[in-house]
Image: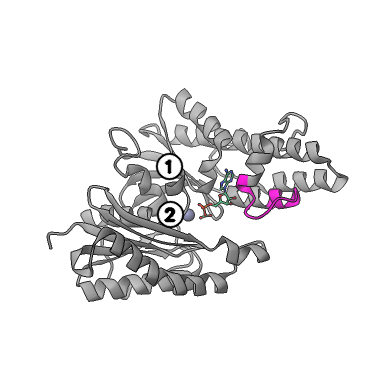
Amino acid sequence: RDSDVVLGLESSCDETAAALLRADGTILAEAVLSQLEDHTPYGGVVPEIAARAHLAHLPGLVRRVMGEAGVGPGDLAAVAATAGPGLIGGLIVGATLGKGIALAAGVPYLGINHLEGHALTPRLPGVFAGGLQFPYLLMLLSGGHCQCVKVEGVGRHVRLGTTLDDAVGEAFDKSAKLMGLPWPGGPHLERLAASGDPTRFVLPRPLLGRPGCDFSFSGLKTAVANIVAKGVDEQGRADLAAGFQAAVAATLADRAAHALAMVPDATALVVAGGVAANQGIRAALTAVAGRAGLPLVAPPIRLCTDNAVMIAWAGIERLRAGLTEALDHAPRPRWPL
Ligand code: KG4
Ligand code: ZN
């Protein structure tokens, strides 16, 4: 088929998303529906609610992007859907819809690892001037994942380090909750930190200076809980938020420096995931990359958080490498890179 348009679907957590991309990376249409309001009353993502919301909204979202792009099933070259890791109900919705469309259109199905979607997005043309070459060091910083990964090629990754307890976004969200901020607390905490003094509360910097690039955030969260339990006023909350963010930024910078030393041939330090939206963390990582003589590459925020452009793009890269899946490919709630 002449067409080079790939449909991407994302439904692994609480974002329902669809996108259409050309093989050269041109985004023909993209849409993301956040389920935030559905889950906010529960203070976290409820799997059953998420699955039902994906089922209710994903087909309409696909129709919408295809309508916007003026693309019919006959114009597709392949369909890519997130097949894991994530909440199994949502994964089944997206993968099954993706397989159905692929079958009806007579094109290949690609079952994408969500983490590979994050990992390959910085190679999307336009994200990094000149194009990002393998290998590079990826720091995946989200609510569900916290990893240092050497990305060697399409389908070729080496995980260098991961969190021993909470993911970094989880640490932001739990600490923000302790500070009385709405869920998900990361962006609220960053806003509060802007008016705080980061030196007032000296919080632990877990694993700082230790070999390797694993992470640990539970001690930091406990320290926040202890300070809150003693009582903090309004300025105290801002100071605590600033201290927390500074501790996380210093920890991530230390871990990134260790990881870069483990990948001497890296062409760049790359950040992805929702926490990559944090300006303080970006600044700390820019400094680390600069000391190693490397650029810090961060996709635009809307491509850092969960979306379907990254799934379609990973699909394009995998299709080019000849890596497609059979229609009996099973979604996997756990699927390490
Ligand atoms: O990648 P993402 O959208 O979803 C997954 O977890 O896969 O990441 C969401 C996480 C949440 O924990 C959220 O609080 C955090 O990213 N986050 C931030 C900021 N924006 C989002 N954390 C710190 N500072 C921010 N500005
Ligand atoms: Zn994600």
Instruction: Indicate the position of residue 284 as horizontal and vertical percent values.
Output: 55, 31
Asked if disc 2 is less than 8 Å from ligand 2, the answer is yes
Question: Which of these two is toward me, 52 or 314?
Answer: 52
Q: Residue at x 53, y 69 (%)?
A: 50
Q: Nearer the viewer, residue 256 or 80?
A: 80
Q: Position of residue 293 (x, y in %)?
A: 41, 24
Residue at (76, 44) in percent of width and height: 223
Q: Which residue is mark 2?
A: 115
What mark, if any, has residue 28 been given in the picture? Answer: none
Quarter of the image where one finds residue 244:
top right
Going by the image, does 70 lie left or right of 169? left
Q: Residue at x 27, y 48 (%)?
A: 25
Foreground residue, 56 or 267?
A: 56
Identify the amino acid type marked 2: Leu
Residue 56 appears in the picture as rendered: yes
**267 sits left or right of 240 in the view:** left
Q: Which residues are magenta?
A: 174-187
Q: Residues within 10 Å of mark 2 (few under 14, many from 20)?
A: many
* Image x and y of residue 233, in percent: 83, 40
Q: How is the image coloured?
A: one colour
Q: Dot 1 corresponds to which residue?
A: 300
